[in-house]
């Protein structure tokens, strides 16, 4: 029973993985701790891995790609229609696994570390400019009083 597709729901410390075989049979749906995730994927044959594009998704996509897996990131809003019942990590991982196999699914490009660093600089600069503007507006308002 060889796993061909995996849906990975990211969390802070515990991740949920849902794997299916070529014929759609569920091979596993289990939770894995952060420190065990790479060992788990190293033991698996190369397969398609779907992840929602969220915080740390680009990091894990890079790590899993380095191992040899085909990783695809998807916007969370595109995965939501595939959730069949109440929102749990196991159900989300199953929905991700289902969504990644759809031919019309739109994917997010995995960002390199250089791209992420540049985006970080832009976001921090944007925050500083916004806070500076807020402070100047407060000072102007107080001086008018």
Image: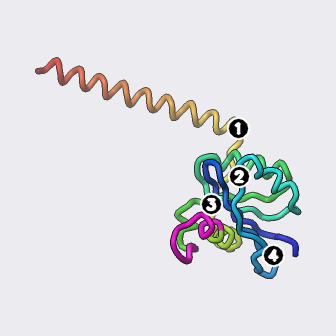
**What is the quadrant of residue 108 in the picture?**
bottom right
Is residue 120 shown left or right of residue 2?
left
Task: Give the magenta part as a residue range.
Answer: 82-93
Q: Which mark is residue 33?
A: 2
The residue pinned by badge 4 equals 21
The residue pinned by badge 3 equals 74
Q: Secondary structure at mark 2?
A: strand
Measure how far apart labels 2 and 4 are at the Cα level: 23 Å
CB under 8 Å between discs 1 and 2: no
Mark 4 surroundings: few (<14), some (14-19) or many (≥20) residues within 10 A: some
Front disc: 1 or 2: 2
Q: Tag 3 or tag 4, which sits nearer the N-term? A: 4
Front disc: 1 or 4: 4
Measure how far apart labels 4 and 3 are at the Cα level: 21 Å
Q: Secondary structure at mark 4?
A: strand
Q: Tag 2 or tag 1, which sits nearer the N-term? A: 2
Mark 2 surroundings: few (<14), some (14-19) or many (≥20) residues within 10 A: some
């Amino acid at each position: 029973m060889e796993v061909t597709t995996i849906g990975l729901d990211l969390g802070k410390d515990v991740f949920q993985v849902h794997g299916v075989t070529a014929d759609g049979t569920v091979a596993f749906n289990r939770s894995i701790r952060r420190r065990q995730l790479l060992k788990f994927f190293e033991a698996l044959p190369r397969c398609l891995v779907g992840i929602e594009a969220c915080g740390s998704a680009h990091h894990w996509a890079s790590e899993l790609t380095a191992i040899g897996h085909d990783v695809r990131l998807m916007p969370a809003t595109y995965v939501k229609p595939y959730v069949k019942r109440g929102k749990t990590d196991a159900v989300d991982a199953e929905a991700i696994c289902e969504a990644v196999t759809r031919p019309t699914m739109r994917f997010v490009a995995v960002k390199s570390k250089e791209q992420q660093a540049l985006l970080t600089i832009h976001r921090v600069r944007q925050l500083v400019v916004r806070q500076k503007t807020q402070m100047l507006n407060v000072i102007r308002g107080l001086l008018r009083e």
